[in-house]
Image (tube, rainbow, N blue to C red):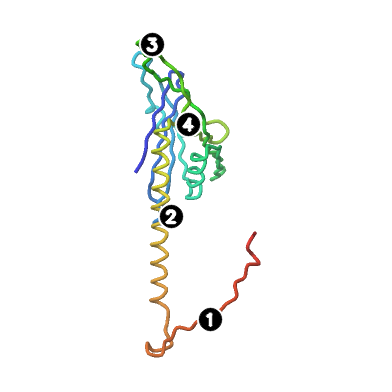
Amino acid sequence: MSIQLYKPNQKNAGAAFTFSIGSNKNNSLPAFYMSAISQHSWDSDKKIGSFAGNAKDPDKTVNVKLSEFECGEVISAIRNRYDYSTFHSFDNNNTTIKFSPWDKDVKISKYDPESKGFKDSKIKVPAFGVSISKGKGSTFKIGMDPGEVEVFVKLLERFIELFVEEKINIQKALSKKSQQNKPSSKSPKEEKVEEVEEEEDFEDVPF
């Protein structure tokens, strides 16, 4: 389950991003991945950008994994339009992921009954930008239009749903296994449900 965004430009400074829900190497829980590749070339005649030439260059590619809480933060940042950044460090490699709102100018054409023609005007729409800075040099940036943002949020929400569902399944399986392995000192007829009243302790609650 993934979304691919390709945004080349004539300055040869574009990027392609992939957002995907995949498997986790450490356990059965799903994982959310982001990968990016820098634009390799630009064909001015066809006005087409290419990324394939950078696919095997480690300086021109990046892969990161977001936690379920980071995904929740991203959703909140998009909904409420504020900057959110997170920092990852692995094997002395530092990576910064940032999500930023921006107002994109979009040209629209409206029919003018007086001139009996169409007039162009600009409106601002709520877009969002994503950037990944790897190490001291490589930075990957891409802008998402409102429609792309909506689909991206749905993918994030779906990941969180799958993560929570699998977490519950794991806890149920562990609880069932624990109950099966628990020795019983009483026969079924002797077992009784004991109710114990305990006082609630709120001393450690931070409010």
- Looking at the rendered image, the disc whose residue lies closer to the viewer, 4 or 2, is 4
Residue drawn at x 49%, y 40% as measured from the top left: 79
Q: Amino acid at mark 3?
A: Glu
* Residue beneath disc 4: 126
Residue carrying label 1? 196
Residue 26's disc is: 2
Residue sitting at x 38%, y 22%: 49
Dot 3 or dot 2, earlier in sequence:
2
Q: Earlier in the sequence, mark 1 or mark 4?
A: 4
Q: Nearer the viewer, residue 84 or 176?
A: 84
Q: Inspect the image, locate mark 1, and give the three-letter code of the amino acid beneath it.
A: Val
- Mark 4–mark 3 contact, CB under 8 Å? no
Q: Earlier in the sequence, mark 1 or mark 2?
A: 2
Where residue 53 sits, quadrant-wise, is top left
Residue 48, how many percent across, how many down? Answer: 36, 20
- Between residue 148 and residue 63, name the one nearer to us: 148
Q: CA distance from mark 1 to mark 2?
A: 39 Å
Query: Quick one: label 2, few (<14), some, or many (20+) residues within 10 Å?
Result: few
Farthest residue to the front: give it.
114
